[in-house]
Image (cartoon, helix red, strand yellow):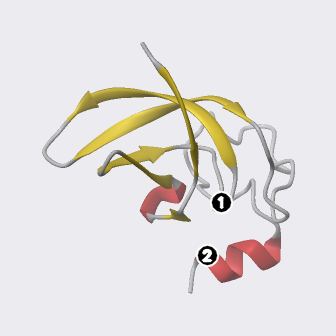
Amino acid sequence: MTIREAVVEKLVSGGQGLVRLDGLVVFVPEVLAGERIRLTVGPVHKGFAQGVLVERLTDAESRRTAPCQWYGICGGCDFMHLTEEGQRDAKV
């Protein structure tokens, strides 16, 4: 798979980041708006694709280490990698 580089445009439902590559919308988990990332693009569906994070090249100011040991495993919290202020802003 080809590794691409992009900047995350914004957060969307489910805490995924939205990236646009050559007009294709790609949803990438575990990223935040403004972060520069490297990703691979999975199968393309009707107008979108799911991306896989390979590497974060820059971190958003609102990024933090999730305070829960189960973050990313249980699937109960989509925004724990955001500061509390970042969570409030994302949920507005």
Task: Nearest to the eye among marks 1 and 2: give it.
Answer: 2
Measured as percent of width and height from the top left, residue 22 is found at 34, 45
- The image quarter containing residue 2 is top left
Up-down relation of residue 1 to residue 80 (above or below)? above
Residue under pointer 1: 79
| The C terminus - image quarter | bottom right
Residue at 80% across, 47% down: 68
Q: Which mark is residue 31?
A: none
- The image quarter containing residue 30 is top right
- Which residue is most to the left? 46
Measured as percent of width and height from the top left, residue 9 is found at 54, 62
Mark 1 Cα-neighbour bin, 10 Å: few <14, some 14–19, many ≥20:
many
- The kind of residue on which mark 1 rests is Phe
Residue at 86% across, 51% down: 67
| The N terminus - image quarter | top left
Residue under pointer 2: 90
Q: Is 2 on the left-hand or right-hand side of 74? A: left
Residue at 54% across, 57% down: 15
Disc 2 is placed on an element classified as helix
CA gap between label 1 and label 2 equals 9 Å
- The kind of residue on which mark 2 rests is Ala
